Image (cartoon, rainbow, N blue to C red):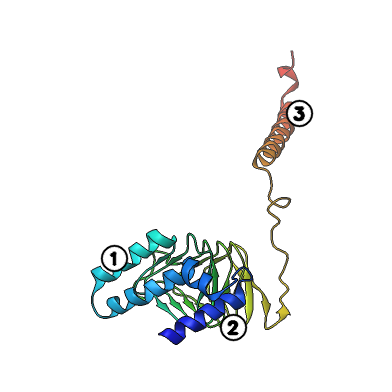
Amino acid sequence: MFQDLKDTIRAYQARDPAARSALEVLLLYPGLKAVRSHRRAHWCYTHGLHFLARLISQASRRRTGIEIHPGATIGKRLVIDHGMGLVIGETAEIGDDCLIYHGVTLGGTGKDVGKRHPTIGNNVLIGTGAKVLGPITIGSGSRVAANSVVLKDIPENSTAVGIPARVVRLAGQKIDYVKEVDHVHDVPDPITSDLAALREELARLKHRESELEMERPDDWII
């Protein structure tokens, strides 16, 4: 356990340029505190002490702003940068050497039972505000861009961006896609569309009026 703590502190120092000393990381970094508390909560959870496990996890949530369900499985050397607003669900699994930023949710969609939360491989980076939802897998060595919403599996060594997220880089190679809708220029204005429809209907009615006038007998004309 002591060796794992030392390795985790080194991981923080390697990934966070603001970490000036091991003592600073140990005493002041909320991500490290949250994971240490989770280790205790997870032990209680796996030994049937569910109430105590939740008590530990909720106390940690109040102290750090990081909510990790005691049922979640977390690998070695997890670095949580800042961490405020981070939520990790009960059946989530996180591999070794991952980096997760604040505002991330490893959550469920509400449609699944049993395994409801994501599985994160080794050496995965998940950017600020990203949402990874459902029993999906993020492959080892992958990157999820900030504020992305991931609803499908992401292969290993890839980069996913967007809402919903799509893979834009795989094994170092850029992936080209068919042009998608430009939500600024390509989406029609509904008012403009309605006015165009009214103009077409008015033109049709005028044309029909002209046809009826041509069909009327001459004695209708006064």
| Image quadrant occupied by the C terminus | top right
Left/right placement of residue 196 relative to residue 155 reads right
- In the foreground, 9 or 125: 9
Q: Which residue lies furthest to the bottom in this view?
A: 3
The amino acid beneath tag 2 is Glu
Left/right placement of residue 160 relative to residue 177 reads left
What kind of element bears circle 3? helix
Q: Are marks 1 and 3 in contact (CB under 8 Å)?
A: no
Q: Is there any visible trace of residue 191 in the rendered image?
A: yes
What kind of element bears circle 1? helix
Residue 89 in percent (x, y) is at 40, 69
Residue 80 in percent (x, y) is at 52, 70
- In the foreground, 170 or 179: 170
Q: Distance between the residues labelled 1 and 2?
A: 36 Å
What is the number of callouts on the image? 3
Residue picked out by circle 3: 214
> Is the residue marked by circle 1 packed among few (<14), some (14-19), or many (20+) residues within 10 Å?
few
Residue 27 in percent (x, y) is at 47, 69
Q: Are marks 2 and 3 in contact (CB under 8 Å)?
A: no
